[in-house]
Amino acid sequence: MPEETIIPVQPRHRLTTRLWHWINALCLIVLLMSGLTIFNAHPRLYWGEYGANGDYAWMAVGSSDSFGYLRFGETRIETTGVLGNWEDSQGKIQKWAFPGWATIPSTYSLADGRRWHFFFAWIFSVGLGLFMIGSLWNRHIQQDLRIGVKEWRPSVIWRSFQSHLKPSVIRQSAGQDYNIIQKLSYVGVIFILLPLMIFSGLAMSPAMDANWPFLTDIFGGRQSARSLHFIAAFLLALFFVVHMIMVLLSGPIRQTASMIFGGKAKEPSA
């Protein structure tokens, strides 16, 4: 009798994807918290090349002796107890933009915040580069994130969006191919937001500005690069929150185990 050919089962998540996922998660958390420490040094955002206290800021976190606020343009929202004016663990009123529990380090230190930020920024950048190379090599991008012509139809996108509002559908989606909303989200994060974070961060560096001045020109000025950097950070934080909600709704134990050990091969779509 002829011997049976055993075809190895491809895990749902390849090793390169799993490694990058967890390294990236750690880096993004540290980068966000250390970035808030850096933001605390000057909690105002501008457009253009220059920005100082006397210039108009399109976004600012401020405070007075009795209240804190968040301002967008001419709209001001009181944030006492959360941003700008809050009470620390020892009962003292602090006036940093973001509270100590949300920053690295938890006490204000611009120098330490920059050290944490720059160190993990390099890990993050190298990891993203290696992930992209590895994903092209093992065809993860072509096979899992390629968006077909039919998927661009508004009706398909709308149905996918509606399914994300139904917990019962979300629970049944684990193990299936990525839908159009997931593909657009991952492609947007991997190929737009993450590179934007890296290059806008480089544009803010005085050393890079001296050697590659075209970077700041691309972003319309150093302060514009800083604004885009924080906007991208906010969108990544929003993506993280939505991602965690979806994981919780679709089965956190199974999903986490799948991202650690690889999981079962994807089930064919109906």
Image (tube, rainbow, N blue to C red):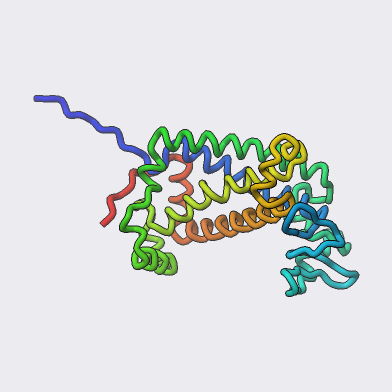
Residue 112 visible (yes or no)? yes
**Residue 137 quadrant:** top left
**Residue 157 quadrant:** bottom left
Classify the position of the C terminus by image quarter. Answer: bottom left
Classify the position of the N terminus by image quarter. Answer: top left
Residue drawn at the location 75% of the way across and 69% of the way down: 71
Left or right: 135 in relation to 73: left
Residue 176 vs residue 110, the one in the foreground: 110
Residue 30 visible (yes or no)? no
Left or right: 190 in relation to 42: left
Residue drawn at the location 62% of the way across and 54% of the way down: 232
Question: From the viewer's perspective, is residue 169 above or below residue 129?
Answer: below
From the top left corner, tell me how far across and down residue 84 is, in percent.
Answer: 81, 64
Question: From the viewer's perspective, is residue 94 above or below residue 120?
Answer: below
From the top left corner, tell me how far across and down residue 80 is, in percent.
Answer: 79, 71
Residue drawn at the location 33% of the way across and 43% of the way down: 265
Left or right: 9 in relation to 121: left
Residue 18 vs residue 192, the one in the foreground: 192
Residue drawn at the location 49% of the way across and 59% of the way down: 248
